[in-house]
Amino acid sequence: MNITKPTLILDEAKCKANIAFMAEKARTHNLVLRPHFKTHQSLEIGRWFKDVGVHKITVSSLDMAEYFAEEWNDITVAFPVNILEIDTINRLAKKITLNVLVESVTSAEFLLKHLTHSVNFLIKLNIGNGRTGLLPSNTETIDAILEATKHSDTLHFIGFLGHAGQTYKCRNKAEILKTHEQAKATLVTLKNKYKAQYPELIASYGDTPSCSVADNFEGLDELRPGNFVFYDVMQVQIGDCTYNDIAVAMACPIVSIHKDRNELVIYGGGIHFSKDRIEDQGKTIFGIIVHYDANGWNDPIPNMYVKALSQEHGVVVVPPTEISNYSIGNLIYVLPIHSCMTADLMKRYNTLDGNDITMMVNH
Amino acid sequence: MNITKPTLILDEAKCKANIAFMAEKARTHNLVLRPHFKTHQSLEIGRWFKDVGVHKITVSSLDMAEYFAEEWNDITVAFPVNILEIDTINRLAKKITLNVLVESVTSAEFLLKHLTHSVNFLIKLNIGNGRTGLLPSNTETIDAILEATKHSDTLHFIGFLGHAGQTYKCRNKAEILKTHEQAKATLVTLKNKYKAQYPELIASYGDTPSCSVADNFEGLDELRPGNFVFYDVMQVQIGDCTYNDIAVAMACPIVSIHKDRNELVIYGGGIHFSKDRIEDQGKTIFGIIVHYDANGWNDPIPNMYVKALSQEHGVVVVPPTEISNYSIGNLIYVLPIHSCMTADLMKRYNTLDGNDITMMVNH
């Protein structure tokens, strides 16, 4: 592998271990694993999930559903249904089992009027994240959606879906578990309320922190974590993985060395990493530099990190004792803050063995 | 134009007015305008610069140079030369006048050894930005680079280049002008120091805030602003343009409405906008919503802005008096914080007239 510019490297063994871990967890708890494929966006990596018995997936856009519909026939689009894309919805619904999210009577009525093929829907609940979804107390709207759709031949209610994204504010396992228990209880309570009326309804739940750390999923039916396939620095900060679990790193050429201020500049900027960042002990961090040898990367180099990103440049803080180890033209390896966004930008992976793995190009 | 998902809209008239403004300014001051094309990354938009007499351009990567070398034959890559891409450098140098940035003896010696065709170089100076470049006081390294290259048949010194990126910290015209004067003086002083030795050497300067606002460019030879082609919310905050100058906006479908918290959710997230943001009066802002009519967009809607972005979602704060004006399936128009990054992500433009303008796809 001759790396000459910013390149996203995938440690296939770590990635497959992450997949096996989550598949085993779902199996142990008798849950369907419906992993979120927005993180890797790759048919080839998707096949690694088939190898451990996964049959159903989650995506975040209809374009992504069309890409994966080549090899998957049960797809949930975990995003409030965009009614402007009704043509895509109908095209997909003709081909696969398509599950969409509804959170308003407006959207339900639009679908009832315009669907040409059967589509399942879940009602999106706000179980604490505060981004999208109906408040569980809003049974008026929930009942109105169910009433509007109950005799439909095309639009079928299959359950409630929640995303406990508020776990991203946690900073250790205890906090994640506490947040998880509250979010889960909210979702399960609502499921139980409607169970007599809809005996088959499911409760779909999932975010990487909860699914990685928790061991109580009682009352839930399926899990939809996504990021765990690669993990990243943000997940380490949240407290649900270790640096050693992170399955992707960016290889970046050093183009400029500044010994006077203990910094070096890499080819690798916001258009490669994304501008996601974490705050840690008063520092803003856009990436963590790791040791690298013939077997791949391992531990972070203490106090060595990306402190700023512009369009193509990354500025790296280097410990004074380390700076003389680097020369212009060397590569350094950087763990991304948010692997989903970095993968989306890079559009391909190179494995440690030198294989090229493609992903979805348009979204 | 049938917009169904996040779409980058270009107001061609505003864009051409921005181009004409900067071309006229360069002409008035007898400067070469060598615009930075990393903002628009489009051959078609590039031709609008040819129409106003521009012959030379700047780019930020060798890949971008290869893309533009189809139609431009004098290109500066304003990035510390990445010696790992020597094959691309030689391929380009065979075809066009290629100008690269050198800031170390290491890079100069590598090029001397490996160049197969003539390349010009500028020495990159740190004129206050503190990202890349030699400190002007470091004449030892400058002299060593000049000494190493002075008899070369392939590597030709043509001048000094500085980027006063510190203007991005300014918040009004007076601050920009003060910063500009200091940065310009640093660059011109060094140019004058070496002028006897290299009578033809140039001083290349440029950043959108300085070039937009200043009227004293004495001692400089060329300007390299880029962002001005579109401007954006960040430039309004810096103080070098008005909202009315911004030539791009994102059209985004509304997918979810939350009257209880005066927010709506759009299809349009970090993978469309980038996660660039500004802080303004205690608020974090990822985009500004504008009025829109048949002629395009105009003024911002007061107190209506994108407060958060996840991968595909944007959360929009709406004034309580406005929220009933919006329905699921409507489009809203959002001025991006950082147009270079948004364009890089979107990979195409739709003009107000419904024309599709393509740009470079790989970088």
Image (spheres, coloured by chain):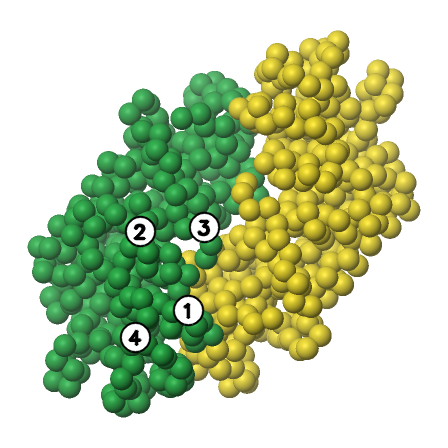
Chain colours: A green, B yellow
Q: Hey, which quadrant is residue B107 in on the image?
A: top right
- Vertical arrangement, residue B312 with respect to residue A346, above or below: below
Mark 2–mark 3 distance (CA, rounded to whole Å):
19 Å
Decide: marks 1, 4 in contact (CB < 8 A)?
Answer: no
Same chain, labels 4 and 3 = yes
Earlier in the chain: of badge 4 and badge 3, it is: 4
Q: Position of residue A113 (x, y in %)?
A: 39, 85
Query: Which numbered marker is on residue A227?
Result: 2
Which secondary structure, mark 3? loop
User: What amino acid is found at the position of numbered circle 4 in the picture?
Assistant: Val
Which secondary structure, mark 2? helix
Q: Report the mark closest to the observer, 2 or 4.
A: 4
> Which of the image's four quarters has the C terminus of chain A?
bottom left
Say which residue label 1 marks.
A88
- Vertical arrangement, residue A228 with respect to residue A88, above or below: above
User: What amino acid is found at the position of numbered circle 1 in the picture?
Assistant: Thr
Which secondary structure, mark 4? strand
**Residue B45 makes an appearance in the image:** yes
Earlier in the chain: of badge 3 and badge 1, it is: 1
- Vertical arrangement, residue A328 with respect to residue B72, above or below: above
Mark 3–mark 1 distance (CA, rounded to whole Å):
18 Å
Q: Residues within 10 Å of mark 3 (few under 14, many from 20)?
A: some
| Chain name for mark 1 | A
Say which residue label 4 marks.
A119
Say which residue label 3 marks.
A361
Q: Nearer the viewer, residue A34 or A136?
A: A34
Q: Is residue A40 left or right of B151 when viewed as pictured? A: left
| Chain name for mark 3 | A
Q: Residue at x 22, y 41 (%)?
A: A16
User: What amino acid is found at the position of numbered circle 3 in the picture?
Assistant: Val
Q: Residues within 10 Å of mark 1 (few under 14, many from 20)?
A: some
